[in-house]
Image: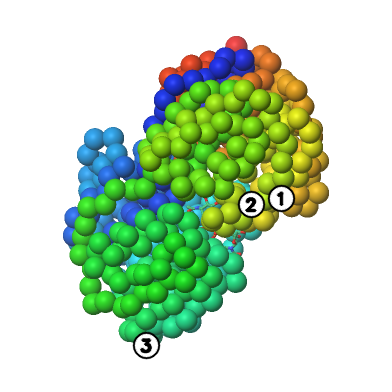
Amino acid sequence: MEVIRVKGGRSIEGEVTVEGAKNSALKLMAATLMAPGVNTLTNVPNIADVHVMGKVLKYLGARIEVLGEHELKIDTSSVDRWETPYHLVAQMRASTAVLGPLLSRFGKAIVAMPGGCNIGARKIDMHILGLESLGVNFDVDHGDIHASIPHGLKGTQVMLDFASVGATENLMMASVHVTGTTVIENAAREPEIVDLANLLNEMGAKVSGAGSSRIEIEGVEELHPVEHRVVGDRIEAGTFIAMAGICGGPVTVKGFDPAHLGLVLKKYELMGLDVERGRHECTVSRQAPIRSIDIQTLPFPGFPTDLQAQTMCLLAQGSDSCIVTENVFENRFMFASELQRMGADITIEGHHAIVRGVERFSGAEVKSPDLRGGAALVMAGLVADGYTTVSDVHHIDRGYECFVEKLQALGAEVRRMEVPDLEDGGEVG
Ligand code: UD1
């Protein structure tokens, strides 16, 4: 079993460059299905979720060439399947992003019902309702969703109940060839949606309004392959910024647009962090104690749920008490109970966490509950007394490239190591 072991107490400082955004790269890869030919994506992160999406595309018939660390050439000219099997969708919920592209290209799709990150029910009813209003028929059979378009796709107005990222993306992609115009109201406004809209427009689609809550997609006949650079990962950036904040820094985080963390950086300043913003980087340090302030997660431009655990970790060393409210996912406080094992004082009441600051964490054995919670436990280990051992690191590998190496370069005493799996009856050597 692989774990990440951290020795607390070493400060981190220096520079770190983030990769392309996981949540953008996955959807851009799916979108290449709609532009038959050789598409080139650059700044693609080398992470487990991208490998799963690569497997999905290959299963469908695409050929993928990996050039250097971060460039993919995806040839989608020979794609001849429209079925995504359970063994791949079960590994990653975002595999459902191929639904819209397959409908666009083939007028039909079979996608297994999703598994994915263990953070709540994560339904796809809004994807289904939106697509139905465009003219898609759905049947669920033996755990697979069978989608077909009996009478063509017609542009219409779709009003989302909630600004869902995945539903907005699938609707955008399914709408590129509609007759007429699709209007998505209450659309998600995340920077990754803008990145996808930019890619689609480069391919010849007519998408306007991405980044606002009203997106219009005018149908076009066909799309052509392109070369596109994935937007920098604001969540990876936010993770290193939070780490700099808890340790003191200074750390310069490069390779992303600080405007994509607008509210996060404001909140961090209120918490006592010093933030210097550049065009594609920011430098973070802290001298003052961490001030406790309330945080609530919301769709962009609200506070991202994907930085909730890292921020709770900071607040758990705050000078007072505060409330962290999770509005996007149910069941996303599993990280808090692991942090309690390290001495944090947190009480969960429904979707609120009451966080009372403590002076120190103590190193312990803890388990990554999910991708971001895992990163936040390593973060807690940086300032804990003694050693912290984080298991289930496969969650962290889903979304962070060279996580341990980047922390080592910043001066952290952290390493990845093999230990016997005690649940399997292994013995401690
Ligand atoms: C994406 C991101 C994830 C991020 C989330 C919110 C990817 C691969 N993942 O996930 O990292 O945390 O946005 O910023 O891009 N919901 C429904 N019905 C639906 C769709 C969603 O009830 O049809 C609910 C979900 O259960 C969840 C909430 O809406 O509670 C938000 O989901 P959504 O915005 O769709 O997130 P994802 O696209 O899954």
Residue 405 point in image, percent of width and height: 43, 23
- Residue position for label 1: 325
Q: What residue lies at 58% left-to-right and 23% top-to-bottom?
A: 248
Residue 90 point in image, percent of width and height: 50, 53
- Residue position for label 2: 297
Q: Quadrant of the C terminus?
A: top right
- Residue position for label 3: 151
Q: Which quadrant of the figure shows ligand 1?
A: bottom right
Q: Do labels 3 and 1 touch, CB within 8 Å?
A: no
Counting residues from the start of the chain, the first of labels 1 and 2 encountered is: 2
- What crowding class fits label 2: few (fewer than 14 Cα within 10 Å), some (14-19), or many (20 or more)? some
Q: Do labels 1 and 2 touch, CB within 8 Å?
A: yes
Q: CA distance from mark 3 to mark 1?
A: 44 Å
Name the element at disc 1.
Answer: strand
Name the element at disc 3.
Answer: loop
Residue 367 can be seen, yes or no? no
Query: Which amino acid does the dot numbered 1 rest on?
Result: Thr
Residue 1 vertical position relative to residue 153 in the rendered view, above or below: above
Q: What residue lies at 22% left-to-right and 39% top-to-bottom?
A: 67
Query: Which amino acid does the dot numbered 2 rest on?
Result: Thr
Q: Along the line of sight, which residue is nearer the eye, 85 or 307?
A: 307
